[in-house]
Amino acid sequence: MPRARLQLLVDVVVVLPLAVTAVVQLWVSPPAGLVGGAEVHTVLAAAFTLPLFVRRRFAVAVFVAVVASAWLQFELGGGLGQPFFAVIIALYAVGAHGSRPFTFVGPAAVVLQVILVDIPRLRDGAPWDEVVPAWFILFGVWGFGRWMRLRARAAAMLTERAEEAERSRHEQARMAVTEERARIARELHDLVAHSMGVIVIQAQGAQRSLDTCPVQAREALSSIETAGRSGMAEMRRLLGLLTDGGTDAGTVPQPTLQEIPDLVARLREAGVPVDLRVEGTVRALPAGLELTGYRIVQEATTNALKYAGRAPVDVRVRYEPDWLDIEVTDQGPSDSMHSVNGHDSGSHGLAGMRERVSLYGGTLETGPTTGGGGFSVHARIPLEAKPA
């Protein structure tokens, strides 16, 4: 239920019956010694009840109006119980909705009543159990209202901080994706440049051997076709990812799946027990797929080293007829940071891997292993390119 509707419901259930019962009592069974008649006291009843409907916006002004009209009604011999409850509601509103320093008008009014009214009554012989308990009620009501205000303010601050943290997290994720796309674009640029270089060299060779060795020229032309198709595919992805930033990363050779054993060897030298399994028929794949597969294994094993320490790591690369299937699983403790925070606390490894896999129309599944004792990264990439 919306907050405004809930507040209206509270007013209808609490304030409206207070006004109705006061008026009905004045006309049905007026107190003895009523001065001014029921008409005057009906106006006073309206004065100490109806302002309560706007107590949340004008807490201090409503409190002053309610106290003044209730006191006047009492002095004119009203003898009703409703004014006391109206004062309690208004006093709570001062604590809950009044701003500093005006909120302290509430307890100041109670102290004033104690000094000017209650203490003289006690000196005149009024029973203390009819006077003193009201002090605790009035101070307690104001204090409870004040506590509710501070609690609401603290909750609002926590909500604001959570929203700011969420916005910051989304911004960091967006920046991570942008940076990763720029890095991928530079790498794809190198792949395309390599393909174009192969085409030029093969074309030169085909021109030289076209008349003297047609078979060799045909092989060169076939290589040109393969390199051209691969280059065009990478170029389409490149155009979809290029950003307006970044510098030339150079034309260094990019790693392939065949270099994963060297990567695993370096991890073993670092003291991490890594088990590498290559299944299926190993064959050459498009350069972009080779690079993507290598980067996934590299990032997943780096995260395992970072968050799981020297826990055993299993790396499986499976060549299927239509898919490249890669899975990296560590056996880190269940309470390790990466198991709790998704293997990506403080870094953007998962964002980069997901971006790479989606570029080729694949899927990436990450999360704790069955039983909670470790973390798994599982990527499946179609060998027939399906750009996302």
Image (cartoon, grey):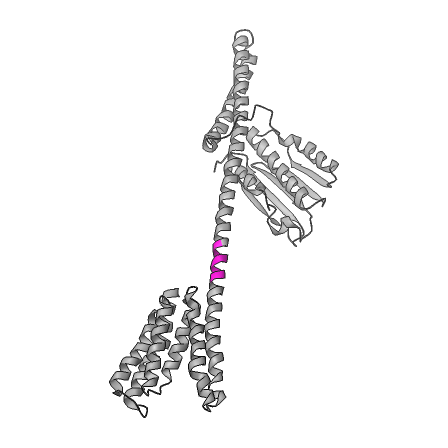
Residue 152 placement (x, y as % from top left): 47, 63
Q: Is residue 149 magenta?
A: no
In this rendering, the answer to whether 200 lies above or below 55 is: above
Name the image quarter holding residue 277: top right
Which residue is at 35% across, 84% downward? 74
Q: Is residue 207 visible?
A: yes
The magenta-colored residue range is: 153-160
Q: How many marks?
A: 0
**Front-lying residue, 4 or 131:** 131
Q: Position of residue 317 (x, y in %)?
A: 64, 38
Q: Is residue 213 left or right of residue 56?
A: right
In this view of the protein, can residue 361 be seen by the observer? no
Q: Which residue reaches farthest top?
A: 212
> Percent from the top left, x then y, of residue 261?
69, 33
Position of the N terminus by quadrant:
bottom left
Q: In this rendering, is residue 262 above or below 112?
A: above
Question: Residue sitting at 48 percent across and 26 percent down?
Answer: 232
**Image coords of residue 2 (percent x, y):** 38, 64
Q: Main secondary structure of the magenta part?
A: helix
Q: Is residue 231 above or below residue 367?
A: above
